[in-house]
Amino acid sequence: MTHPLLDLAPLSAARFASIEDRVARLLGTGQDVVITQGEALLPLEGAIRATAGPGTTALNVITGPYGQTFGDWLRDCGATVYDLSVPFHTAVTAGQVRAAFAEHPEIDFVSLVHAEAATGNTNPVAEIGEAVREQGALFYLDAVASIGAEPVLPDAWGVDLCVIGAQKAMGGPAGVSAVSVSERAWARMAANPRAPRRSYLSLLDWKERWIDGGRTTLLHAPAQLEMLALEACLERIEEAGLDAVTARHRRAAAATRAGVQALGGGLEPYVRKASEAAPVATTLRAPADVAASDLVARALESDPALPLAAGGGALAKEMIRVNHYGPAAAPETVEAVLTALASALTAASGADVDLPAARAAAALAWR
């Protein structure tokens, strides 16, 4: 008995290449794009290990947990690393990046997360990219959470390594990801004796055996389900229009923020400035007398499928994350989240909340 999800023909090299081309169009890039068969941590780590080594001096920007991880990888590669950390409720500025360059003019590599879904902030990549170009450093960008929720323009911003994943704002599968690679980045890899080769982490293998070979022979059998899901995801974005998809996420973020501020009960946006809040997810600061994890648990009792989570690690006590991305970037999802949070606040602490005002504020912000 045949099954549409099991009895799949092997994915051809031509179809694989056509999906890469669609990713390139999504990014508006003329750089090479490599689709990697794994969650985005695969190319995120692979790109760092390919381009960084004992001769590298890196500026690692930390605005959330992923920036901390990148610093660990860079040090593990033997790079000299200067961390630029800012409070998780804000964003880094180009001025802070330039100040780091002035203090350490030898910096030749910059790692940055565009949008931190875990902390709800987003960084001004265009302005930072201008500073990085002035420095002449290689620019590595994690755009996993931002792609589909806000503009991601590696060529215009001077990004040499731009990693994306499909599982958040793109509304696609988690088991496949991609990276755009500039000629400067390929040259850095080729000159790095520690760059992974004959390895699942190796981008150079893809360059030499796939791209340079005219994209006719795949390195290994791709995961058909993930690739077909990515293709369908890209088709859906193309049909709706990327501008419409990003606008939907922007509205979801604005509506959630406005609704929470009108709700009361001690909840407030975790990222203080709306201009620094990521469209992909909105983080909230729980009232001081209630643990965020407890509020989330109570809110999920009414609907376990709501896109709510407590912050990770130490943030579990104070942060709630509303993951309004992909299909969840919708007005009905925002309203359901506000309703559940209102109920949880009342049950946990007897807080005085105004749900009608919250719904009205969210609807107005969406419009």
Image (cartoon, rainbow, N blue to C red):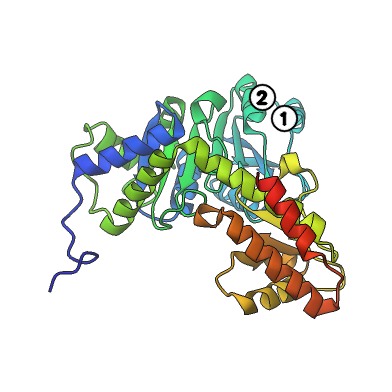
Residue 277, how many percent across, how many down?
Answer: 70, 45
Q: Earlier in the sequence, mark 2 or mark 1?
A: 1
Q: Residue 346: in sight, yes or no?
A: yes
**Residue lying farthest to the top in this orientation:** 134
Q: Residue at x 17, y 65 (%)?
A: 7
State the quadrant of the C terminus.
top right
Q: Residue at x 73, y 76 (%)?
A: 294
Q: Is residue 5 above or below residue 191?
A: below
Which numbered disc covers residue 112? none
State if disc 1 and disc 2 touch (CB < 8 Å): yes
- Residue behind mark 1: 94
Residue 170, how many percent across, how many down?
Answer: 47, 48
Q: Residue at x 63, y 26 (%)?
A: 132
Task: Tell me which amino acid carries mark 2.
Answer: Ala
Q: Is residue 273 left or right of residue 72?
A: right
Label 2 SS: helix
Q: Is residue 211 left or right of residue 3?
A: right
Residue 98, how many percent across, how many down?
Answer: 73, 27
- The image quarter containing residue 357 is bottom right
Q: Is residue 298 above or below residue 219?
A: below
How crowded is the residue under tag 2: few (<14 C-alpha within 10 Å), some, or many (20+)? Answer: some
- Residue behind mark 2: 131
Task: Tell me which amino acid carries mark 1.
Answer: Ala
Label 1 SS: helix
State the quadrant of the N terminus.
bottom left
Q: Is residue 148 above or below residue 98?
A: below
From the viewer's side, name the closer residue of 87 and 318. Answer: 318
